[in-house]
Image (cartoon, helix red, strand yellow):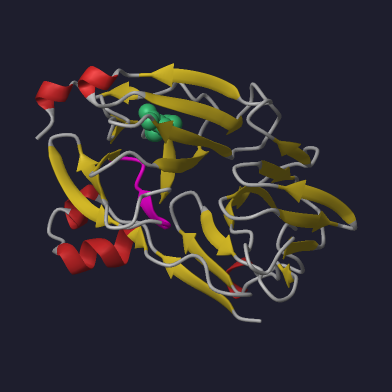
Amino acid sequence: MSIQAETRYASSPQEARGWNTEQTRAALLIEQLFEQDGVRLVYSHYDRFITGGIMPVNKPVTLEPVDQLKAQYFLERRELGIINVGGAGMVTVDGEVFDIDFKEALYIGRGKKEVIFSSKNAGTPAKFYLNSTPAHTTYPTRRITKQDAEVVTLGALETANHRTINKLIVNSVLPTCQLQMGMTELKPGSVWNTMPAHTHDRRMEVYFYFEVPQGQSVCHFWGQPQETRHIWMQNDQAVISPSWSIHSGAGTSNYTFIWGMAGENLDYGDMDGCPITELR
Ligand SMILES: O=C[C@H](O)[C@@H](O)CC(=O)C(=O)O
Ligand SMILES: [Zn+2]
């Protein structure tokens, strides 16, 4: 089985201002997360947040510790959030089996020693998107579906930002140390996520775009509100947002994305809004 774990360092707004397209993409974009029977991880120095993908096809895939952790097992000092963006699958946590279907989530608390991912059918493999952060204590492992989520509908078709925010792994649903995850689905005809945009210097964030139709893309905006840049993103790609950066995208169609955050607090609503007319 192949495990790839890449390190991405943190950068200051001053440094990021001078980046060209290639440097921007190398620092922030995660182009490939899913590889047959493989584990792909990106270890960011922003809040030591790990973004990953596991796609078991022909055999179960175990989450092994990587060198960056210097740990006996992956969750020795960490918690883990998982959302399945593929076919029906299973996650086995220290022998307990959780069925995780498309768009269902699993939270795994610190200290679980063995985490094994598998697909129900090789023809329609599960695609497990992962976010993991350092954890100071152990909270219960739990499966979360859309029925359990805190759901908020925002925006309107007139402003092309009508969308449903499914808060899956947040403190109104279950306790976590610092991880928050959810999934935002845009309605047909709406293309803008997170507009009006915001920053939250207390937390970094990662967006993973999926259900982007063939031939379409999402233009993701980042940077300080008065010094923005963009990254063109394809289906099944993720992007790291430094805590000082906005994170907002406009697609050439509607799409779905997963957001994951970590840092100073668990307060989803702690955002500094950026008035639309003041963006630069
Ligand atoms: O800090 C929170 C995150 O940026 C997202 O939850 C925002 C989002 O899904 C949206 O407005 O579309
Ligand atoms: Zn945010």
Q: Is residue 244 magenta?
A: yes
In the displayed structure, would residue 176 be above or below residue 124?
above
Q: Position of residue 183 (x, y in %)?
A: 50, 36
Q: Is residue 177 magenta?
A: no
Camera-side residue of 271 and 161: 161
Camera-side residue of 253 and 139: 253
Q: Quadrant of residue 203?
A: top left
Residue 231 visible in the shown view: yes
Q: Position of residue 174 (x, y in %)?
A: 70, 28
What span is colored magenta in the figure? 236-245
- Residue that protrudes farthest toward the front in the picture: 123
Quadrant of the picture in which ligand 1 is shown: top left
In the displayed structure, would residue 161 be above or below residue 136?
above
Q: Position of residue 255 (x, y in %)?
A: 37, 42
Q: Quadrant of the C terminus?
A: top left
Q: Quadrant of the N terminus?
A: bottom right
Q: Residue at x 29, y 30 (%)?
A: 190
